Image (spheres, grey):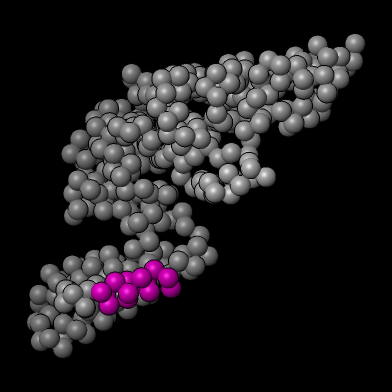
Amino acid sequence: MADITAAMVKELRSATDAPMMDCKKVLVEADGDMAKATELLKERGIAKVAKKADRVAAEGLAGFKIADDFSKATVAEINSETDFVAQNDGFKKLVQDTTEEIYNTNPADVATLMATPFGSKFTEAVTKIGEKIEVRRFATLTADETTALNGYIHSNNRIAVILEAKCDSAKTANGMRDTLKQIAMHASAMKPKTLSYKDFTPDFVQSETVGRIEIIKKENEELARLKKPLKNVPQYISMSQLTDAILAEAEATIKAELTAQGKPEKIWDKIIPGQLARYIDDNTTLDKELALLDQTYVLNDKLTVAQAVEEAAKALGGTAEIVNFIRLQVGEGIEKKVDDFAAEVAAQMA
């Protein structure tokens, strides 16, 4: 009997897209004959999925599971080619079963998941459904007694969010769960890409600066045409750019304007904080769009998400800080294939 090596299994998997365990099994049966092993996979329908490898799976559903005691939560994205299949009961069950498997077994990545016995079951289910279906990504968060954990899945089952917040006590963690559910709903709608402006690299901020300022200038052209109030045109777009020196210069400018307006210095302390806050607001548009903690909270537009968390924890007599969040939206970042129907017909007629 031929010695079945890991390299042989990998080669067959690459050629057929079949799960590793099935590849190894047919290689044993075929005594190491790659062609015969491939035929065995095809005969059993296991290699059928590979024929669809050039198609784009950009539809699908998100999976969501959270422990009854809020100690653990999993989100997953499983893609299909069409929305029609995504609404199929068989596909919905596959999403539920896959999310449950991930939640229970904590696989390191998609390849690890598909190399387990569950991977074979997944492939069998895909074969029955009849189009390209794949696990795209997943994540799990866990909580200890001083960590608040919660999440949300949108009613369309295409967006799922989980968050965790570190708290000063178990009491605060328990009390923060409702707030985290609300913030998960906020994240579902507002599409943050990262937790904080501190996550942005200097190169990314620099690359975004000119274009975003130009967008505001063009918006002002339209507002002027409509005779509506204009937006303040910023110099910057992120708090990461607002150094102490820049903020000091902004405060000095405000004081100079107050002097020119004849405002008495004794009331400056009531005016300057508000104007400086407005300056920061105008010059942090990138943060407010992409960073969760820096976004304006949808349930209270006078607060950022970070401030809303701080206030909610304070009301409980403690402290809390969101330290992680995961947001999955089905198909996000996937370039969908646009079919040329006329060209396809012509090709069939040739």
Compare residues 296 and 323 and report the one nearer the observer.
296
Residue 35's quadrant in the figure?
top right
Residue 318's quadrant in the figure?
top left
- Whether residue 213 appears in magenta in the rendering, the answer is yes
Residue found at x 59% / y 24%: 113
Residue found at x 58% / y 44%: 345
Residue 288's place in the image compared with 51, above or below, is: below
Residue 91's place in the image compared with 203, above or below, is: above
Q: Is residue 178 left or right of residue 338?
A: left
Compare residues 154 and 292 and report the one nearer the observer.
154
Residue 96 lies, in percent from the top left, at 43, 21
Q: Is residue 254 left or right of residue 6?
A: left
Residue found at x 67% / y 45%: 350
- Whether residue 182 appears in magenta in the rendering, the answer is no
The magenta span reads: 210-222
Residue found at x 59% / y 38%: 55
Is residue 122 visible in this depiction of the protein? Answer: no
Pick the quarter of the image with the N terminus. top right
Residue 306 lies, in percent from the top left, at 30, 48
Which residue is farthest right? 1
Q: Is residue 199 left or right of residue 184?
A: right
Residue 225 lies, in percent from the top left, at 21, 78
Which residue is farthest front? 349
Residue 46 lies, in percent from the top left, at 66, 20
Total labels drawn: 0
Magenta stretch, main secondary structure class: helix
Residue 79's place in the image compared with 243, above or below, is: above
Is residue 333 visible in this depiction of the protein? Answer: yes
Residue 218's place in the image compared with 6, above or below, is: below
